Amino acid sequence: MRTRIAVIGPGAVGGAVAAWLDQSADNEVILCARTTLDRLVVETPSRRIEAHPPVLTEPAEAHTVDWVLVATKTYDAAATRRWLAPLVGPATRVAVLQNGVEHVARFAQFASPERIVPAVVDIPAERSAPGRVRQRRMGTIVVPQGENGRAFIDLLADTPITVSTTEDFTTAAWKKLALNCAGAVSALTLKPAGISWREDIAEIQRAMVRECVAVGHAEGAKLDPDLPEEVIAHYRDGPKDSVNSLHADRVAGRPLELDARNGVIVRLAAKHGIAAPINAMVVALIEAATND
Ligand SMILES: NC(=O)c1ccc[n+]([C@@H]2O[C@H](COP(=O)([O-])OP(=O)(O)OC[C@H]3O[C@@H](n4cnc5c(N)ncnc54)[C@H](OP(=O)(O)O)[C@@H]3O)[C@@H](O)[C@H]2O)c1
């Protein structure tokens, strides 16, 4: 029997993963979309792939599947959850391919937490139009060790995307958050990654990451004290003109994943009685700059 897979949010990440999964005759892929599309066309690092899965735009049209992959932006979680009621049965697994550290919390009321597979995604991709995606690298996905993790590896086994498991998903997710939180300075200043070469800006980024490390520790992540320096090295070693998604979304006038990338540090810091003034300030400044 074919594996039935529903991809909620066939944008950059969801579109690329759905198109790769659809290449296998063992899979039956359906797309759960907000904006309809005629087909998926993905320019991948190796070749152009196309897929013609059915596209649903109304949750009422959906039926139970084996796998749900949630690939909407974090701020669309509320609307995304409407899809889960018809798609999720007792044996359905729900993989959450989103940024941040709250993958399970975001959907726990709508699917059994032990069937939710949180995923740290590193698949650089962008969408030029509905169904049209450029995947810059094949990329990687990290999921927790265990039965769900093994099942997710099997699901993606015929694709060129590298999936691995980790025994400490909390740490993996917070490490990615440390990198992402520092990227907010680009969204604030509208300057690409090379801005980290300014020592005054790097100092702000180090402070943001130090706050992230403190809150991550309180949440159970094992984060190296050298992480702030590693994050600065990451931004300095990469292309100076690299534009992160928060920056790109602000330039395009789209909503921002600010709460999932920086707001979460401020919220959880307050929960643990930890000070996170630099992230709080950056969140306030970006919110003030982007809201009337
Ligand atoms: N792109 C990357 O390089 C990358 C890399 C690593 C991690 N991520 C993370 O992956 C997640 C997805 O990012 P992305 O870049 O793929 O976003 P994206 O290109 O904006 O795609 C999101 C998709 O979700 C759809 N959507 C929104 N609300 C929906 C709803 N209620 N029902 C069905 N579909 C809905 C959007 O529809 P519309 O067509 O109507 O907008 C869009 O197709 C984010 O958390 C992001 O941070 C992205």
Image (cartoon, rainbow, N blue to C red):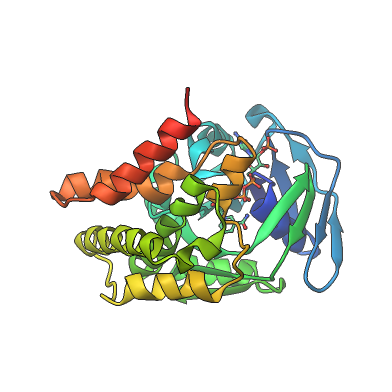
Q: Position of residue 70 (x, y in %)?
A: 57, 48
Residue 39 left/right relative to 216? right
> Would you place residue 153 above or below residue 253 in this image?
below
Which sits in the foreground, 229 or 177? 229
Location of the N terminus by quadrant is bottom right
What number of labels is visible? 0
Q: Position of residue 58 (x, y in %)?
A: 68, 28
> Would you place residue 215 above or below residue 230 in this image?
above
Q: Position of residue 250 (x, y in %)?
A: 57, 41
Residue 228 left/right relative to 217? right
Residue 73 left/right relative to 116? right
User: What's the residue at 36%, 45% (across, down)?
Assistant: 282
Q: Position of residue 284 (x, y in %)?
A: 35, 37
Q: List the single residue furthest toward the left.
A: 273
> Would you place residue 159 above or below residue 193 in this image?
below
> Would you place residue 260 above or below residue 137 in this image?
above
Which sits in the foreground, 95 or 61? 95
Is residue 57 in view from this perspective?
Answer: yes
Q: List the single residue furthest toward the top.
A: 292
Q: Which quarter of the picture shows residue 173?
A: bottom left
Is residue 3 in view from this perspective?
Answer: no
User: What's the residue at 50%, 69% (across, down)?
Assistant: 235
Q: Which quarter of the picture shows residue 101?
A: bottom left
